[in-house]
Image: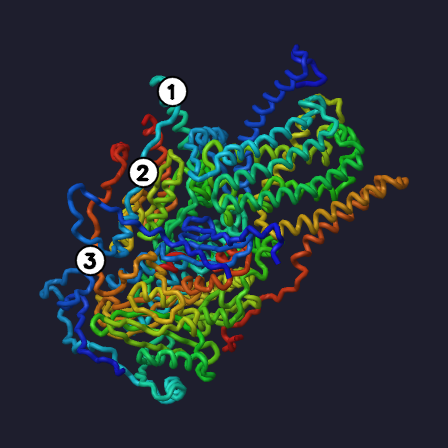
């Protein structure tokens, strides 16, 4: 587990990696269980009500109760469901989420394996999960599930591209695709300062990858009534929920490391791993609170609006970002970082105003008000 | 224009009741709509499954596991978003800030597969009864039913109209009856607490 | 077809039990108090059996309608509404459609808004369909009625004229059995699809009795659960 | 011409059954949508799942017992339903309602319009995808209004407080002060919902020019209320066919231009503000004391034979009562013209050609109450 620290008396790195994996899965399961509690409390607070309070102090036992209940639920399978797709759907979604955790450096010396291309590995693995959605959608042989599955595939694929383009911008600036060295690069200034446009694109694309509220079309309750997971019950369904929260952790960690400087930025690396862990989790919770807040306050986009937003807005802006980075890196003007900051900031401002104005640009007549005393003739 | 594939209700096949030796004397006359509907309203069977640990663990070991699972089940009852009539408005009011059901760990889920409790809130008419029965059968097994309001209990103010089913327990077994027309949100919460006591008491079955 | 003014049945409120068509058994019919206790009522003049048919004043819209559709036997009278009085017109079954098209298209009437279409079951005087029309520009209100007998309850459908009538006619067919010929899809609306012979709102369809014990199929363990 | 790889395949439109149990069908309403890809090709609504014979049972109940059924038929605007029923019977019997009772009736009906529109705002937010936030904000205000109704009539939802001829009993003595408190909270609630939904980019993108309906199609389908006004028809029963004491107040009637889902939302939001001003005017003019039931009320309400078609502007549209009486104390035939029934009949023409997600929005914008549709 501790690559550079004393190695628990076990020499072979493989056994240590295995030990680290077991510890991570245990920690991640507990962390995910309490993510459900955390989410219900925060969304309840936004909606002016108390979250679960009756089961244990402050409802802390609620996630355990939910998990136990789901464990013992009867596992129904629709008679005419496709058995192979049905069984493997869970693993199709579950495995990529936990694979991504392997390459994430929690603190300077707490990481399972240091891959030279860990950023590339993370993006590639997180792109795998849409196969699981398709299998779940097709396997459960219900029209809603099929519709949800198709929408999930379309959304995940088309939001993978802006995510990768934003990351390419980052890699161009830091000249390395290893998350560890990207963090080391940000010891003086976090990358969000140099790449605000890249940060915005990453943020929206990550919400879409997680299928959180503004983009939760595959599992939207009001249209597709639970979409892909409509036929799953009991422990199988809770696996899907588990992976959606693991993905949330992974993407908020990724955002914290790449854009906010991870455990490096204000205090540097020599501070003890306790502070580093605290710093990382603080930045991670910034992202998580944003995801939960988005879930409580944003209505859902329509499928065609979602697609046009990805292809017509996010990808062109990401390409502009990469072009600007390339320009400055090749010509290397004296104040490279100043230019980077200015150009990317302008790009971010252009993106925000475009989105803000896109709906308002069409002039719309206000309501006509007719007084009730005047015998106003009818308009028809 | 794509021809409309109207989803007709499945025509009820008239079962041939061949009692041995008795010649079929009466020619089978065309069943009227009322009789065909009566066949659709047969009560849903209730077959309680036995959990795996009950077959494996010896008697003495089952006690703590029963208690633990009963606590887990009672403190995370997930009802289905299924409102019928006026009682549905009071059910929604119970989820809202003034009387928050989320405190009991009760979160409404859209699909019957992920829910344990079915709150029948409103009048069950004979046209809706087959749908209610189908939803009940789709729910995974440790499931309970709360009949909310007078209409679900015995037809309520509409009990004398022949299109209304006099009580939902004619088609699905009901665990808790909540009186009132519509019952106050506090009454529904009291129904949930009664259900929790019932789960605790029935844990050894 | 003149209005069949069959002898009017005295349907006294609580005591009237006409022999052949029993009115619906009241749920909790208040037992009439013994005559002694009842306060001496002033000698009541005979209760008017039929609403007085006051012909509408001259110049009201039924003249315009009569002019628009010459040669149609129309019985017009005034009907109360919240704002005063309105004109009601009783028309035979077969010249219903010309009257309605005239009411809708005539510029002076312009009755484009079909508000309400209801069936009324006058037990032995047959089934009646009542149309309430009104107009936004000329602010007229008109009620058109037509009567059909029990044995051939067929009325021409107005679904082509007024799209609003589409669902109302399907509902009236479910409840009263009045068939609207020419209706695009006269499939049961409020009743299950295979129930085409049971008309709940007809007077001869009594309310069902309240069953005493309903818990026959309670779960066997359910009873003893409570303490 | 069909590409060769598609030669063998025949593209079939997929019928989807938005069944009686669906989170966004506001109760038991079933739609069979035939969709090709995401576009809706055909809609066949199935209703009747909540048909429980309100009209048949009202024929068996006399004029005092029938008010409970008017409540239960229109269970989100109960006071409008009771007002329509009482006005019909009073018109037939020729009873004059005292001043004080008229004012209290108007105050309670307009408060009920507010609570019904709050319910619409909440449900409409859920249809557009908000995870319940609009519901909780709207219900917080609705509970305050329901507290006033409970103090006055003793019940949260089924008030049965209006009687033929006036009111059942006197209101609580701090009635005006309580209503003033609730109005302050309601104005804050309306502002909250306005900020949450109206200027939200995604909400505007989801609602604007969806399910647009022209004025003459709206009249042909017999729409009424906010749907009719959103399509540009300037028609409000409280002004054009005045009943009770509405001519004494001055308020504005909002009328839309495009007839789409966003206009219907704006019309309802504006109507809530107008209702607040009506209540304030009515509270000032409320006579402090006076009878609430006419003195010489007959002990048994017997109506002379005849018929009347009384119509009231309920939050969903024109709620009418066609009452036919053959003398005696029971209505011979009572037809409730429910606005949701007529508004719903136009669903097919509004939804064909839109996306699946818009079909949910259009249904939500109609604000139907299923017991009102099936009676």
Reading the image, the residue beneath label 1 is B56
Residue at the spot x=57%, y=56% of the render? D194
Q: Position of residue C93 (x, y in %)?
A: 31, 78
Question: Is there any visible trace of residue D173 in the rendered image?
Answer: no
Label 1 to label 3: alpha-carbon separation: 59 Å
Chain bearing mark 2: B
| Residue marked by disc 2 | B175
**Relative to A277, does residue D242 appear above or below in the rendering?**
below
Of mark 2 and mark 1, the one earlier in the sequence is: 1
The secondary structure type at the circle numbered 2 is: loop
- Left or right of C193? Residue A61 is right
Does residue B185 appear in the picture of this structure? Answer: yes
Foreground residue among C11 and C202: C202
Q: Label for residue C28?
A: 3
Are the residues at dot 1 and dot 3 in contact (C-beta closer than 8 Å)?
Answer: no
**Label 2 in the same subunit as label 1:** yes
On the image, the x and y values in percent for residue A286 come to 65, 36
């Amino acid at each position: 587990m501790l690559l550079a620290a004393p190695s628990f008396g076990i020499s072979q790195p493989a056994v240590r990696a295995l030990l680290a994996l077991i510890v991570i899965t245990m920690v991640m399961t507990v962390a995910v269980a309490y993510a459900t509690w955390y989410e219900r409390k925060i969304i309840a607070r936004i909606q002016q009500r108390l979250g679960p309070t009756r089961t244990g102090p402050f409802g802390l036992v609620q996630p355990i109760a939910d998990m136990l209940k789901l464990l013992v639920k009867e596992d129904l399978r629709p008679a005419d469901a496709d058995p192979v797709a049905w069984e493997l759907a869970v693993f199709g979604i579950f495995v990529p989420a936990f694979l991504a955790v392997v390459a994430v450096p929690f603190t300077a010396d707490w990481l399972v394996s240091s891959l030279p291309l860990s950023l590339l590995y993370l993006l590639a693995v997180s792109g795998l999960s849409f196969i699981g959605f398709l299998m779940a959608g097709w396997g459960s042989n219900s029209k809603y599930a099929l519709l949800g599955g198709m929408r999930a595939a379309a959304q995940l694929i088309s939001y993978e591209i802006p995510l990768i383009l934003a990351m390419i911008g980052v890699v161009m600036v830091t000249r390395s695709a290893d998350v560890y060295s990207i963090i080391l690069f940000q010891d003086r200034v976090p990358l969000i300062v140099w790449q605000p446009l890249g940060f915005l694109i990453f943020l929206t694309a990550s919400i879409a990858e997680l299928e959180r509220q503004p983009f939760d079309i595959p599992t939207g309750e009001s249209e597709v009534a639970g979409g892909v997971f409509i036929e799953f019950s009991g422990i199988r369904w809770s696996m899907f929920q588990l992976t959606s929260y693991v993905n949330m952790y992974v993407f908020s960690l990724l955002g914290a490391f790449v854009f906010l400087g991870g455990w490096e930025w204000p205090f540097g690396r020599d501070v003890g791993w306790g502070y580093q862990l605290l710093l990382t989790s603080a930045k991670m919770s910034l992202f998580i609170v944003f995801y939960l807040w988005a879930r409580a306050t944003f209505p859902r986009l329509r499928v065609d609006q979602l697609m046009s937003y990805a292809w017509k807005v996010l990808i062109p802006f990401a390409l502009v970002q990469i072009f600007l980075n390339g320009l400055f890196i090749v010509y290397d003007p004296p104040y490279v970082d100043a230019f980077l900051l200015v150009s990317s900031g302008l790009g971010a401002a252009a993106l925000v105003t475009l989105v803000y104005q896109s709906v308002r640009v069409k002039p719309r007549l206000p309501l006509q008000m007719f007084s009730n005393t005047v015998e106003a003739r009818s308009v028809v | 224009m794509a021809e409309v594939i109207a989803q007709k209700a499945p025509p009820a096949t008239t079962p041939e009741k061949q009692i041995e030796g008795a010649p079929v004397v009466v020619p089978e006359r065309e069943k009227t709509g009322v009789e065909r509907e009566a066949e659709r309203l047969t009560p849903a069977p209730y077959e309680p499954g036995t959990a795996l640990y009950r077959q494996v663990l010896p008697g003495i070991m089952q006690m703590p596991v029963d208690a633990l699972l009963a606590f887990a089940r009672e403190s995370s009852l997930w009802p289905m978003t299924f409102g019928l009539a006026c009682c549905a408005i009071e059910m929604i009011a119970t989820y809202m800030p003034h009387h928050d059901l989320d405190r009991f760990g009760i979160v409404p889920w859209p699909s019957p597969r992920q829910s344990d409790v079915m709150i029948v809130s409103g009048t069950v008419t004979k046209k809706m009864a087959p749908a209610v029965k189908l939803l009940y059968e789709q729910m995974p097994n440790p499931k309970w039913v709360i009949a909310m309001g007078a209409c679900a209990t015995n037809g309520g103010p509409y009990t004398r109209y022949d299109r209304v089913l006099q009580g939902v327990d004619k088609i699905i077994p009901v665990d808790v009856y909540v009186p009132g027309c519509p019952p106050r949100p506090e009454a529904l919460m009291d129904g949930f607490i009664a259900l929790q006591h019932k789960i605790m008491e029935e844990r050894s079955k | 077809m003149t209005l069949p003014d069959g002898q009017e049945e005295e349907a006294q409120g609580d005591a009237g039990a006409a022999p052949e068509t029993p009115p619906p058994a009241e749920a909790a019919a208040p037992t009439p108090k013994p005559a002694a206790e009842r306060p001496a009522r002033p000698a009541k003049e005979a209760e008017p059996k039929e609403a007085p048919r006051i012909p509408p004043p001259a110049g009201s819209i039924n003249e315009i309608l009569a002019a628009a559709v010459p040669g149609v036997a129309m019985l017009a009278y005034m009907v109360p509404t919240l704002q005063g009085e309105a004109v009601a017109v009783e028309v035979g079954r077969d010249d219903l459609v010309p009257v309605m098209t005239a009411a809708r298209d005539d510029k002076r009437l312009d009755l484009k808004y079909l508000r309400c279409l209801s069936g009324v079951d006058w037990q032995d005087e047959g089934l009646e369909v009542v149309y309430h029309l009104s107009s936004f520009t000329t602010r007229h209100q008109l009620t058109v009625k037509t009567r059909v007998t029990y044995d051939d309850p067929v009325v021409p459908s107005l679904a082509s004229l007024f799209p609003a009538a589409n669902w109302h006619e399907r509902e009236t067919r479910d409840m009263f059995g009045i068939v609207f010929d020419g209706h695009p899809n006269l499939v049961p609306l409020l009743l299950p699809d295979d129930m085409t012979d049971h008309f709940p709102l007809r007077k001869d369809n009594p309310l069902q009795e309240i069953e005493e014990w309903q818990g026959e199929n309670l779960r066997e363990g359910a009873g003893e659960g409570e303490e | 011409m069909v590409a060769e790889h598609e030669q063998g395949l025949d593209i079939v439109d997929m019928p989807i059954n938005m069944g009686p149990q669906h989170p966004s069908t506001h109760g038991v309403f079933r739609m069979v949508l035939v969709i090709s890809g995401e576009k809706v090709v055909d809609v066949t609504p199935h209703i009747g799942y909540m048909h429980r014979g309100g009209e048949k049972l009202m024929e068996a109940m006399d004029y005092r017992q029938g008010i409970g059924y008017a409540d239960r038929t229109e269970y989100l605007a109960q006071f409008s339903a009771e007002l329509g029923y009482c006005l019909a019977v009073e018109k037939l019997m020729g009873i004059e309602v005292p001043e004080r009772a008229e004012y209290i009736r108007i105050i309670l009906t307009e408060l009920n319009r507010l609570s019904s529109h709050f319910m619409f705002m909440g449900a409409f937010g859920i249809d557009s995808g908000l995870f319940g936030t609009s519901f909780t904000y709207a219900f917080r205000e609705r509970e305050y209004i329901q507290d006033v109704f409970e103090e006055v009539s003793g019940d949260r939802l089924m008030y049965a407080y209006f009687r033929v001829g006036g009111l059942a009993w006197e209101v609580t003595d701090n009635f005006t002060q309580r209503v003033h408190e609730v109005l302050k909270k309601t104005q804050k609630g309306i502002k909250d919902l306005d900020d949450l939904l109206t200027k939200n980019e995604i909400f505007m993108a989801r609602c604007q020019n969806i399910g647009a309906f022209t004025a003459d199609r709206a009249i042909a389908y017999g729409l009424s209320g906010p749907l009719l006004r959103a399509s540009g028809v300037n028609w409000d029963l409280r002004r054009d066919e005045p009943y009770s004491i509405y001519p004494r107040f001055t308020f504005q009637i909002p009328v839309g231009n495009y007839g789409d889902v966003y206009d219907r939302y704006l019309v309802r939001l504006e109507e809530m503000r107008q209702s607040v001003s009506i209540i304030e005017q009515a509270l000032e003019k409320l006579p402090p004391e006076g009878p609430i039931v006419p003195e010489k009320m007959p002990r048994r309400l017997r109506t002379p034979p005849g018929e009347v078609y009384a119509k009231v502007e309920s939050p969903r549209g024109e709620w009418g009562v066609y009452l036919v009486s053959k003398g005696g104390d029971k209505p011979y035939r009572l037809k409730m013209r429910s606005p949701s029934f007529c508004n719903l009949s136009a669903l097919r023409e509004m939804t064909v050609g839109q996306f699946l997600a818009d079909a949910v929005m259009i249904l939500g914008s109609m604000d139907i109450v299923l017991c009102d549709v099936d009676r």
